[in-house]
Amino acid sequence: MSVKVRIPTILRTYTGGRSEVPAEGENLSQVIESLERNHPGIAARVLDDQGKLRRFVNVYVNDDDVRFEDGLGTATPDGAGISIIPAVAGGC
């Protein structure tokens, strides 16, 4: 399945500055593998040492938070839009 992945500014050094890149995969895990093949280093920023989504990285497939779906097993239908969003913390 071909999908479009929206890349946050902090990860665009891996995509040559592009804010959106294509990827392939039937689920999120396969999409991340596809991203890594085409943009080496990006998977380490999205996944932790155990291969799970990093705690402070939110991923959405067609506006659905994958943490409330099937995590890395979340289906990525053809034409889906995937957003990688690093969590932002702050305060006074």
Image (cartoon, grey):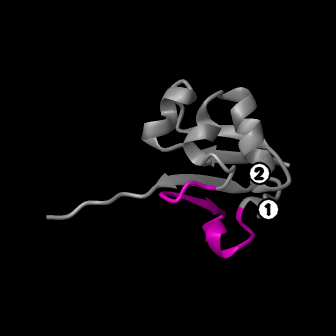
1 on left or right of 88 = right
Quadrant that contains the C terminus: bottom left
Q: Mark 2 points at which residue?
A: 29
In the rendered image, the vertical position of residue 17 relative to residue 27, given as above or below? above
Nearer to us in this view, 68 or 48: 48
Please give the name of the residue rendered at 54% of the width and 24% of the height, measured from the top-left corner. 16
Q: Which residue lies furthest to the bottom in this view?
A: 68
Residue 20 picture quarter: top right
Q: Which residue is drawn at 78% across and 58% down?
A: 76
User: At label 1, which amino acid type do we have?
Assistant: Gly
Residue shown at the point (56%, 52%) measured from the top left: 84
Amino acid type, mark 2: Ser
Dot 2 or dot 1: first in sequence order is: 2
Please give the count of numbered marks on the rendered protein.
Answer: 2
Q: Residue furthest left?
A: 92
Q: Which of 21 and 51 is in front in this view?
A: 51
Q: What segment is highlighted magenta in the picture?
A: 53-71
Callout 1 crowding tier (Cα within 10 Å): few <14, some 14–19, many ≥20: few
From the top left corner, tell me how far across and down residue 89 is, in percent: 32, 60
Picture coordinates of residue 60 (x, y %)? Answer: 61, 62
Q: Of all residues shown, which one is farthest toward the top? A: 16
Q: Position of residue 88 (x, y in %)?
A: 36, 57
Horizontal relation, residue 76 to residue 91: left or right: right
Callout 2–callout 1 Cβ contact below 8 Å:
yes
Secondary structure beneath disc 2? helix
